[in-house]
Image (cartoon, grey):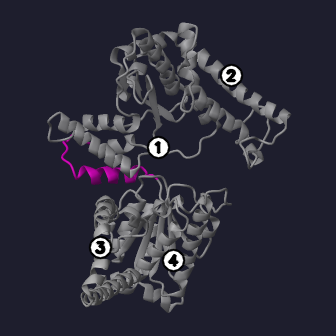
Amino acid sequence: MKRLYIFIHVYWARILLIFLVFLCLLGSFFFMKYAVNSYFSLESFSRRNIAAPMALFLPMFVIVHLITLPIMIGMQYYVMQGGFSKLFSTQIGKAKAKVKWDDVIGMDSAKKEAWEIVKLLKDRHLLKAVGGKIIKGTLMVGPPGCGKTYLAKAIATECGLPLLPAVGSDFVGIFIGLGAAKMRSLFRQARALAQVEGGCIIFIDEIDSFARPRRAEMGFGGATDHNATVNQFLTELDGLRQTENNIVVMAATNVPEHELDSAIMRSGRFDRKIYVTRPNLKERKQLFDFYLAKVKFDASVNSSILSRRALGFSPADIENMIREASLVATRESRSEINMRDLSEAYDRVVFGLKSNIVMNPKEKEWTAYHESGHAIIGYLLHPTDDIIKATIIPRKGALGFVARRPAEELFCANRDELLADIKVMIAAYVAEKIIFGKTSQGVGGGPGSDFYSAMTIAKHMVWHYGMGKSGLLGDFSVMQSWYDSEFTVSEKTKETLDTDVQEILYSCIKEVEELLVSKKEFLHYFAKELLKKEELEYDEIQAIFDKFNLKPLSGRPPLTF
């Protein structure tokens, strides 16, 4: 009966339309019956005059319908499969997935914030007794794969309320007014569910798809439809205040909140913001234990080691790593995953699959010295990051790479750490120059390349952090023009800032060159080991440095796995 009431409440217009069509068909039947009786009451001459044109018209009628009928059936099938109706329809009822509150792990801070909303939804009568109002809008902000949708499902399950899910892109279309119509339909269904179930949670994932700031129309109606959708959403949010507080709107986004329309983010609409971050060490261990419990693994698997190695992983990354490890074990016809499978899965998640690129011996040697420069300077000079892997096996289009990571999460780098990053990045350039007397295009080539990354850091140090040698202070992005990417600073200031950037790069190159020249014998040895094995893991790298009795000059303690 509940679903019947909801169906009638939401689709009353369609029911009324079907009823009117039925009345029209019924009226047509009686009209045809009257017409037939009148026809046979005529004289034979009159009947022949009427029948003759109809006989000529009948073949044409059949031919036309033989052509149009398949088209009509095809269009009907398209509509039945979803077609245009998907622009207006939303599934009614609770979300199918049942997520228990205890299953939400790896996000303790966000879970604590969300629990307050759960308690308010459960005890609405207590809040009304003191004259308060429940939080009507909650926005979850954070990187992808960190459990925002999972948390929303858990809130709905814990509260026992129906969850009405939607995606921001559902409200974006090519026709003006469709987004606003879909928004009205969503909230109409939510009110119907709330009347029956005592409450309802609307969850809009990727809300930034339609909630960007409103803008002026530039043609073709795109901005008009976008503005109408945002306006309708604001109207629906405010309309909730006119009834009982039994509908909560939850939304999730990966973009910073300042990129959303300010009217949506003002107080009284999205009152609560939950910041979902990547899990810390303790939370990563909980996640590994949770996902490992779903597969078979041997005694060598240690979740503590895995959690320290998977620094910066999201819950989705950890789940993917376990899935990849089980695929590796399956390919080798084993029923349990081991630590080696997880190590290979880690490489796939972080570095990508191995490429089928085959380098000639000269390119391979050049790549070995290139990566050896990165590894040696990273190990000796970086104050926080250690080298965990060096390889000359191509992955993701790169001929080789050196992976480094800190022992713990770091969120604010100082000048020494930024300079160390630059030194590690330009070390390959210096190594090539020392060994071959010239350099290759491997040091450049756009975003992600050595020079690009080094210059980006150096520019930020000078232009944004006030770390230039000239002493110019301030964040010069304040002086960036609003309509293009040009900085409205004087040519003299710009020249000084550019000089500071070059000074940082040259000073780093000089220091790296002095160190690599003094360790030239070790550079040859490391490159040969890399050529021989093609891939060096953390323990092997540590053993090579220990053989030459080389310790980090920064005093950084070694990683412990």
Residue annotated with mark 3: 52
Q: Is residue 201 visible?
A: yes
Q: Tell me how far mark 1 sits from mark 3, CA to CA.
A: 94 Å
- Amino acid beneath label 3: Ala
- Alpha carbon distance from label 2 to label 3: 100 Å
Query: Which of the two discs, 2 and 4, labels the residue nearer the N terminus?
Result: 4
- Picture coordinates of residue 408, whole percent (x, y): 46, 43
- Amino acid at pointer 2: Tyr
Q: Residue at x 75, y 43 (%)?
A: 476
Tell whether label 3 touches label 1 (CB within 8 Å): no
User: Magenta segment range?
Assistant: 278-302
The number of callouts visible is: 4
**Residue that carries the numbered disc 4 in the rendered image:** 135
Q: Disc 2 to disc 4, how far (Cα)?
A: 55 Å
Can residue 553 be seen here? The reply is no
Q: CB of mark 2 within 8 Å of CB of mark 3?
A: no
Mark found first going from the N terminus, 1 or 3: 3
Badge 4 density bin: few <14, some 14–19, many ≥20, Cα 10 Å: some
